[in-house]
Structures are given as structure tokens and as C-alpha cells.
Image (spheres, rainbow, N blue to C red):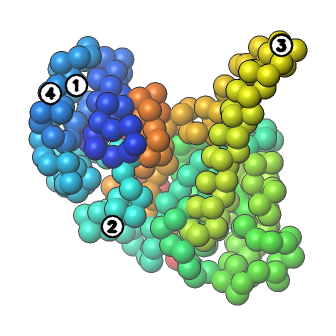
């Protein structure tokens, strides 16, 4: 069974949310969990919730070293994957120092999922975007490699047959955009192993133009924050409408399920987290605002990524592109 190391001190809802998530996972799944963090905090919180001691263990360390300890547990094979809602740059640095990049990869991308309109042949409500913050100024080689790894991830985790790939740009024109985007477009268009749909714009991203969208980390991070802000705005607007008019309340009652579902999707509660791809180990980064439900799904995703051998899938994808 997969063993997942969980950082209890990462995120704005730590440590309550990760401890509650791990306790529930231990009771309801066959995933083993190691809670990593301050002894007094872990013991106190576990005394308040039911959990299965056969599937939940603890590893006591100071709060400031939890991410590094999680990574060490994975590197030493005491755990199979790590889950954290910690600060993304810190998590990335930790993984760079603790894990090994798959052969041929220059920079590891941080991937994220986002909800889209329905896509033909794909029942998964999420698509994948990478990079979202790890590499701000990539080269064409990076974009092509990320596309390959994204395809491998989407095919194994989301079970999408032959995922489509889009390259984020300002125009569908293959000669538009900075030089590294133009060169990446040329190479992806010539690669028969990739279902490349060409350049996609920011408007195309939530419309489901591609199963995998590739971009630089600066742009990807802004898009991800924008999508999250839209979800918050919709919930705020719904709350204000509820308070102002009785007729609007009646309408909102009819739409309540859809509004709540959209908010769950936009905040990744239904998905849990996103992978840091390109390493020889599995690392799942949850949103820093993740609650217990989101972290439970992040733990399940980590277990699935381990079972599906995502590091091996990434290595295989790059070995094809390098030959």
C-alpha cells in the first residue's frame, strides 16, 4: 500500500486541516499516512478525532523542517510520496535538493489543474497547465519537454486517451510571441507523437481548448490566481444577492448546487493538489488555503501518482523526445 508523508505545518489552515485529512484517510482508505510535524500539536489534534492507528503514524520534527523531512522520508523509501500545502518556492527548493531530475530534463515544472468546459472524448472536468511558477523564463526545450510530461500525466492520472496540447500565446499565429514560444510551436507542430492543437489564448484556457496547456511559470501563475479570483468573486456576488432581494434568493436556491460545485472546482477541492513533475519521486503541492476535504484528495492523488509511476512516465516521455 502507498505510504504518504503529510506536512502538517504547510498552508493557512495548518495544522488542523492536514491532521483531520490524514485521520479520515486512515479510516476510509487503504493508504498509509505519516504525519510530520511538532509532537505536541500532532498528539493534541489526534486526541480529538477518530483515526486508524494501523494506517496512521507520526514523525516528530520542528515546524520549520517538516517539508525537508517529508522529502527525506520519500528519498529514503520510508514513504512513497509527499503532500504539502507549504510555500511553493520552498517546496520546489526542497525537492531540487532532495530528489533527482529525470534524465535530460533541465527544469522541473509545477503543474496545476483548472476546470474547463467539456472537451470531446474527455469526461475529466479538469485540464492541466504547466508551468505555474517554477520557471519564469523557460527555453523552447523546456516547453517541449513539459508538454511531453503533461501528456504522460494526463493520460495516466486523468485517463485521457491521446491528450491534446496547446501552447499559450497571444495569437494563433505560429510566428507570434517571444522567440522561445515560436520555436516551441515549430517543434511541437513537427512532432507526430503529440496531438498539438497550436497556440491557445488566455480565453481558450477555460473553454477547454486543450487537455494540456504549456506556458512559462510567470504567466501560468497569474492565470491560476485569476481563475481562483473568479471563483471567489462569484461566491461573493451570490452572497450579496442573497442578502438584497427575495426574488434573487429564490433563483439562487435553484442554482445553489451549481454555484457550490463551481466553487469546489475552481478552488481544487475536488482534485486536491497538483504535481511537481520531472523528479524521480512523487510530490503533490496543495493550495495553501486547502481544507481537510481538499487535502484528503491531495493524499489520494499522491497515492494514485505513485501507483501509476508518474516519475517513470515522465522519464519515458522524455526518452522518446530525446531520441
Q: Earlier in the sequence, mark 1 or mark 2?
A: 1
69 up-or-down from 231: above or below: below
Write down the residue under mark 3. 246
Residues at badges 1 and 4 in contact (C-beta under 8 Å)? yes
x, y percent for residue 103:
39, 72
Q: Position of residue 26 (x, y in %)?
A: 29, 22
Q: Secondary structure at mark 1?
A: helix
Q: Secondary structure at mark 2?
A: helix
Q: Earlier in the sequence, mark 1 or mark 3?
A: 1
Q: Earlier in the sequence, mark 2 or mark 4?
A: 4
Q: Which residue is mark 4?
A: 43
Q: Nearer the viewer, mark 2 or mark 4?
A: 4
Distance Cα–Cα, label 2 vs label 4: 29 Å
Q: Which mark is residue 93?
A: 2
Question: Do residues under tags 4 and 3 come within 8 Å of each other at their CB atoms?
Answer: no
- Secondary structure beneath dot 4 equals helix
Front residue of 202 and 54: 202
Q: How many other residues sit within 10 Å of disc 1, few (<14), some (14-19) or many (≥20)? A: some
- Which residue lies under the disc numbered 1? 45
Left or right: 186 as drawn, with respect to 143: right
Q: CA distance from mark 1 to mark 3?
A: 42 Å
Number of the front mark, 4 or 3: 3
Specify few, some or many for label 4: CA neighbours under 10 Å numbering under 14, 14-19, or 20 or more.
Answer: few
Residue 288 seen in the figure? yes
Residue ranking furthest to the front: 244
Give x and y (percent) for residue 161.
67, 45
Amino acid at each position: 500500500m502507498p505510504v504518504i508523508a503529510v506536512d502538517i505545518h504547510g498552508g493557512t489552515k495548518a495544522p488542523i486541516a492536514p491532521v483531520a485529512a490524514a485521520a479520515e484517510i486512515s479510516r476510509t482508505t487503504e493508504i498509509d499516512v505519516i504525519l510530520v510535524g511538532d509532537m505536541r500539536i500532532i498528539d493534541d489534534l489526534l486526541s480529538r478525532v477518530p483515526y486508524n492507528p494501523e494506517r496512521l503514524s507520526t514523525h516528530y520534527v520542528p515546524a520549520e523542517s517538516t517539508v525537508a523531512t517529508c522529502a527525506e522520508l520519500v528519498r529514503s523509501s520510508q514513504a512513497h510520496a509527499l503532500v504539502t500545502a507549504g510555500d511553493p518556492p520552498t517546496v520546489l527548493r526542497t525537492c531540487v535538493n532532495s530528489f533527482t531530475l529525470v534524465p535530460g530534463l533541465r527544469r522541473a515544472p509545477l503543474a496545476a489543474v483548472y476546470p474547463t468546459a467539456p472537451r470531446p472524448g474527455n469526461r475529466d472536468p479538469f485540464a492541466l497547465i504547466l508551468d505555474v511558477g517554477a520557471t519564469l523564463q523557460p527555453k523552447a526545450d523546456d516547453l517541449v519537454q513539459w508538454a511531453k510530461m503533461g501528456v504522460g500525466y494526463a493520460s495516466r492520472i486523468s485517463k485521457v486517451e491521446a491528450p491534446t496540447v496547446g501552447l499559450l500565446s497571444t495569437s494563433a499565429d505560429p510566428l507570434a510571441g517571444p522567440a522561445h514560444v515560436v520555436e516551441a510551436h515549430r517543434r511541437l507542430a513537427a512532432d507526430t507523437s503529440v496531438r498539438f492543437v497550436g497556440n491557445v489564448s488566455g480565453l481558450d484556457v477555460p473553454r477547454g481548448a486543450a487537455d494540456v496547456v504549456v506556458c512559462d511559470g510567470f504567466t501560468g501563475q497569474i492565470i491560476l490566481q485569476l481563475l481562483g479570483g473568479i471563483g471567489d468573486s462569484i461566491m461573493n456576488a451570490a452572497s450579496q444577492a442573497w442578502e438584497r432581494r427575495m426574488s434573487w434568493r429564490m433563483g439562487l436556491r435553484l442554482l445553489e448546487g451549481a454555484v457550490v460545485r463551481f466553487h469546489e472546482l475552481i478552488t481544487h477541492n475536488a482534485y486536491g493538489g497538483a504535481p511537481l513533475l520531472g523528479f524521480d519521486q512523487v510530490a503533490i503541492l496543495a493550495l495553501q488555503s486547502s481544507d481537510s476535504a481538499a487535502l484528503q484528495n491531495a493524499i489520494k492523488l499522491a497515492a494514485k501518482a505513485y501507483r501509476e509511476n508518474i516519475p517513470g512516465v515522465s522519464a519515458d516521455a522524455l526518452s522518446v523526445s530525446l531520441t
